[in-house]
Every structure is written in C-alpha cells, then in structure tokens.
Amino acid sequence: MRNIYLLASVFLLNQSLFCQDHIHWGSTGDPLNGLTITWHASSLSSTGDQIKWGYTSAYEQGAFDVDHRDDYGGYLFDYTFPTLNANSTIHYNIYTDDEWGHATRTFQTSTDPGSTQFSFIAGGDSRTNMSDWQTAANWLANESTDFHLFLGDHVNSGTSTTDWTYWYNNGVNYLERNLIYHTAGNHEYGSIYLNQFVMPENERWYSFEFGNALFICLLTEEDFSTQYTWLVEQLSTTDKTWKIVFFHKPFFCTGSHVDDMTTYRDTWWQAFDDYGVDVILGGHVHYYLRSKPINLNVSSTAAVAEYGSEPGQGRLQILSGSYGAPVYAPGTGWFIEENLSTMNYTKFEIDGEVLVMNAYNMVGTLIDNVTINKGAANIADGGATVPSEYSLDQNYPNPFNPGTTILYSLPLASKTQLSIYNVSGQLVTTLTNNHHLAGKHSVHWEGTDGSGNPVSAGVYFCRLRAGAYSQTIKMVYLR
Ligand SMILES: [Fe+2]
C-alpha cells in the first residue's frame, strides 16, 4: 500500500512539473522594458523551444526562438519581450518538448513606467511550510499591482532542488501571473538562486526606476563595501521623488536577528539617512514590523517625531513577509511603531508626492497603514508657519461646560481622525475624519454625541490620529 502511495506521489510530482513548467517573470529593467518570461523543461526540444505571442489570442507578434541555459533537472528558457504596451494583456503560447500548447496563457502588463501613479507589493520568507506558502501565493495571485518585491528566503535550502521544485509548484498561481523583483535571503544565496531569476544589472544588487521612484535592491549576503560605493552613487545622482531600498536582513528589528546588520549602520544606513531614503524594506524576521529609526540621531527612549526623507526625520522601515516561514512574535522597542505576529504582505500605492502603505494578513484584513505626503509639507492653512511635529494640545477651557476647543498640529498633510471616547472607551462622536493640510487646526466640541444629544457630565478622552501619529488627552465635563 505504501509503495502504491509513493508511486502515486512521484507520478503526481512529475505530472505537475510537466504541466507547470516553472513559469515565472523577471525583468532586466522596468516592468515594460526588459520583461522576461522563464520556463523549465526536462529536455531540449529537437527544433528548439519557442514562444509566440501577441496582444490577442492570434499571437500576431509572431513566433520567436528563445535562449536556454542548464538548470537542475533540465533547462531554463528565457524570452525577453521588446518594449511592451502598458495596461495590456499578452497572450502567449510556449513550444517546448517538441510541441506547442504547453502553456497557452495570458499576462497583464503594468501601467506605464512613466506614470507617477502606480502600486507594488512587498513581502517574502516563503520557506518551510509549503501549505502556508500555497495559501499566501494563491492570495497574492489575486492582488493586482504593477510589480512585486520578494524580500528573500524563498526556500529552506538553496542547494536543494527538491525545495525549489516544491516552491515553484506551490506558488504557481502567483509566480505565473506576476512580475517579481527578487533579493536573496540567507537560506538560498548561491548557484540555484542566481540561475533562476532574471533581474536588472548584475542581478545580485541592482536598481530600476518606475514613475517618480528609484528602487534599489541590495544583497545582505556578501560584498557590502562594493555595494556601499554603488549605493551612494545611485542615491547621489537620482532626482526621483521617492527612494525605496529593499534587501533581506533588516537593520532595526527584535529577536535573534537584532544585530545582523549593526556593522553596517555607519555605511549603508548612514547613506539611507544622508540621501533621504524614504522606505527601507526587509524580511528575515517572520513578523510584521514598522519602525522609523534614523542613523546618528537616535533617541534611546523614543522614536523620532515623524516619517520623512529629511535629516532628523525617521526612515520608514517595514519588515514584511511570512509567506510560509514560521511566524515569530516581535518584541517592542523605542523605534517600533507597530508590530504583529502574523503572515503578512504590504501594498504600496504611490500617487505623485503621496505614498500610502497598507499591510494585510493573508485573508486581506488591514493590519497597519501609514501615509507619507511630501507635496503638502510646506503648505499650511492661511500661510502660517508649518509646525515641525504632530501634536494634540490640551483642550480649553478644561473643565468645560458645555463646549470646548481642541487644537492640533500637522507638519504634513495627513489623513486625520479626531474622536471623543467616554471612560468606558466607547466612541461618543467623531469630530473630524478627513485629509487636512499641514498647519495648526482647531475643532470645537459642543459636548454632544454623534446624534446631537448632550452628553452627561464626566471624564472624556479625545484621541487624534494623523498618519502614523496618535495622541490622547483627558477632558472633564462639569455640570
Ligand atoms: Fe532569513
């Protein structure tokens, strides 16, 4: 009986290999310029593998020969498309193993890389639990963004062909549909990893541009000083609004990996700080964490006041992933704004000078959110001086009866929510829930609930939430 089961398993594995062909997508440049499809086959076709494709199912662009290279258990075939139309569906048909039709599928191209309105997803750490990886991959397959960043630790053992085969097979729905820019994790860096994916430049570290953003991929496994020189060159010569860096091992985290990158704070992180990197993405830790450390101006007791690119502001460091790796519980610390123990991914939407990051678990529940707005940083209501930091002042008068005024300050235009709660923590009323410009704002509360009814005397709390900032004041309503 056991032998029959084993035979069936081997048969199913071979079947799935045969059918799925490890189709995945990379790019030597941006998502439309250098887009490359890669697939696997166990043998060389006698007449050579080909692909035919077009913007319709007639494959009107024609059939094309493709390059091949050795792969574990066979060959990898690459075809790099010419510059593609934005927001289009590519129909393709692969000729391999001496016949057409192994893959007759479609791929959705990204929006125009010249657009300053685009989105991407970041996450990683798919190793170990292939059932969880399949769950994550199936969820991610349904997300529609322009491209993805994979933050490393794809598999447990980068030298294990079995690990890679399971990774491809369980992630097939995601990998076949999405363009992914990869960075290597400590579990896999080596020959198989480097042979699998097509990426820009030397494929170990690289940069690409999309819209008004520069993306920089670094490798946390070797060549730190060479990369530092290259990194500074990249950052010092760009005129992009947004600078986003991604790599596997994070600088500021908790748990066993806390010092993994400490050696490079005076080089890599200093460069992030000096040149105003906006977002720093990492994995490796198997939990979700948002923090805003800066390099040489860190407080030992509190995070800096705000996110931003300027000196003295905090870099937005997001550690995201857990696509199948064991989920760990994060600790807390002065630089940590939010932390959660759950499988997760992060979705970024850039619209001109506004960047919105939403973090989700693998059923699509929002677990964290932050907005950085560069555009309104110097525009205050009425031309007044822009406050240097977020604040919520004590209401006046206090105690009060029946009305009181609440003042708050926004250094950046922010989604702002100001709500009143009773001593039981129940929401009484929301005074504002909207985007507001940078500046000093005041709101008057008449001492009524959301329906306009007078509240009873007692203690109330007013909470301000603006961007990632949150503050609460206590107020007393006297009869
Ligand atoms: Fe790792």
Image: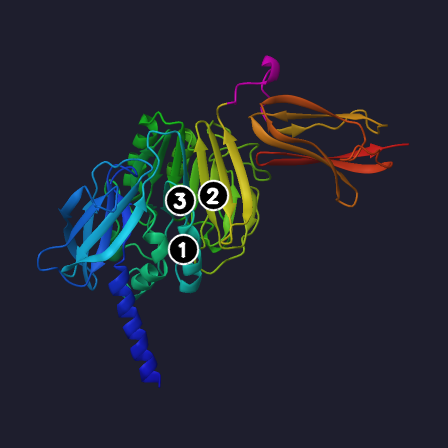
For the residue pair 55 and 349, the one nearer the viewer reads as 55
Point out the frontmost of discs 3 and 1: 1
Looking at the rendered structure, the secondary structure element under dot 3 is helix
Q: Residues within 10 Å of mark 1 (few under 14, many from 20)?
A: many
What's the amino acid at mark 3?
Answer: Thr
Q: Which residue is drawn at 42% across and 43% down?
A: 281
What's the amino acid at mark 2?
Answer: Ile
Q: Name the residue under label 1.
A: 137
Q: Mark 2 points at which residue?
A: 318
Q: Distance between the residues labelled 1 and 2?
A: 20 Å
Q: Residue 168, how many percent across, how many down?
A: 32, 59
Left or right: 123 as drawn, with respect to 80 = right
Q: How crowded is mark 3: few (under 14 residues within 10 Å), some or many (20 or more)?
A: few
Q: Residue at x 24, y 45 (%)?
A: 36
Q: How is the image coloured?
A: rainbow
For the residue pair 5 and 339, the one nearer the viewer reads as 5
Q: Residue 198, how many percent across, how many down?
A: 25, 47
Against 17, residue 84 (above or below) is: above
Quadrant assignment, res 86: top left
Against 469, residue 12 (above or below) is: below
Q: Residue at x 21, y 57 (%)?
A: 101
Quadrant that contains the C terminus: top right
Which mark is first along the chain, 1 or 3? 1
Label 3 within 8 A of ligand 1 by Cβ: no
User: Could you say which disc has been placed on residue 263 in the image?
Assistant: 3
User: Could you say which disc has been placed on residue 161 in the image?
Assistant: none
Left or right: 144 as drawn, with respect to 418 = left
Q: Do the residues labelled 3 and 1 touch (CB within 8 Å)?
A: no
Q: Residue 441, how many percent across, how many down?
A: 66, 22
Looking at the rendered structure, the secondary structure element under dot 2 is strand
